[in-house]
Amino acid sequence: MNELKNKLREKLLFERKNLSREYIEKSDELIYQKLISLESYKNAKNIFCYLSIDGEVSTIKFLQKALIDNKRVFVPLCLKKGIMEAREIMDLSELKEGKFGILEPIKNSIKINFEEIDLSIIPCISANKEGYRLGYGGGYYDRFFENKSIKNSFILCREKMIYDNIPFEKHDIKFEHVLTDKN
Ligand SMILES: Nc1nc2c(c(=O)[nH]1)N(C=O)[C@@H](CNc1ccc(C(=O)N[C@@H](CCC(=O)O)C(=O)O)cc1)CN2
Ligand SMILES: Nc1ncnc2c1ncn2[C@@H]1O[C@H](COP(=O)(O)OP(=O)(O)OP(=O)(O)O)[C@@H](O)[C@H]1O
């Protein structure tokens, strides 16, 4: 199974590299507009959202907007293999580049308990329309959401990166929504 996922990861990352700058910018903007129009965004007090890298759907503008709208914003801090926490940031300038080139909050940032998160924004390399995703293979999101009652979870995925036949296993979490530049 891991072999299958790794092959697919490689193929999809290659395809992602070949998306045009134009399409990337356009889909980033469309997805951003959808995000800030969500009722679950408007009602959210506490938001958990990733910090985008490479060809992932950009979340920078969204995070800035959330901070301006006085939401409390939490981002992933990877602690050890497969384990991450949601830690608060007040400003994007607090972030430092961590493992994998991903921006991270400082070590003594405030942790939020899972139950207090009102809205979760989740990265992927690819996803299917049912809410299964393919990530970088660290298992961070599967463990973070394991055995939890998930509310208002949104995977961000460009329409061109949607892939119907994502292989999934018992531990893989099915998220509630997939936001693309089309749906
Ligand atoms: N933007 C963004 N942030 C995210 C994720 C993501 O997919 N996107 N994550 C989603 O999970 C978590 C980080 N995922 C990670 C996955 C792998 C490695 C990593 O170091 N990989 C090594 C090999 C590790 C090993 O197997 O020993 C490498 O590829 O060099 C780091 C972070 C949390 N933050
Ligand atoms: N809840 C879990 N408990 C134990 N191991 C897990 C769990 N979830 C995932 N794993 C393990 O983590 C590894 C990576 O899983 P997977 O390929 O599904 O990651 P991914 O969803 O692509 O990664 P990420 O969530 O970091 O983006 C696999 O070896 C898997 O067995």
Image (cartoon, rainbow, N blue to C red):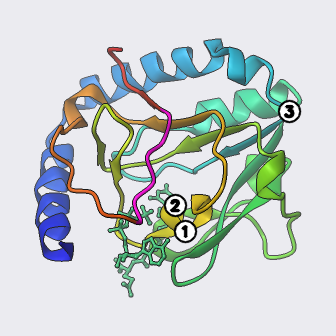
Label disc, if present, on residue 45 of the rendered structure: 3
Q: Secondary structure at mark 3?
A: loop
First of labels 3, 1 by sequence position: 3
Which residue type does callout 2 highlight? Tyr
Tell me if mark 2 has few (under 14), some (14-19) or many (20+) residues whose alpha carbon lies within 10 angstroms of its own: many
In this rendering, the label closer to the viewer, 3 or 1: 1
Q: Find out if the beta carbon at label 2 lies less than 8 Å from the nearest ligand 2 atom.
A: yes
Report the Cα–Cα distance between label 1 and label 2: 5 Å
Residue 159 lies within the magenta run: no
Q: Is residue 173 above or below residue 153?
A: below
Q: Find out if the beta carbon at label 3 lies less than 8 Å from the nearest ligand 1 atom.
A: no
The quadrant of the picture occupied by the N terminus is bottom left
Quarter of the render that holds ligand 2: bottom left
Q: Quadrant location of residue 69? A: top right
The quadrant of the picture occupied by the C terminus is top left
Tell me if mark 1 has few (under 14), some (14-19) or many (20+) residues whose alpha carbon lies within 10 angstroms of its own: some
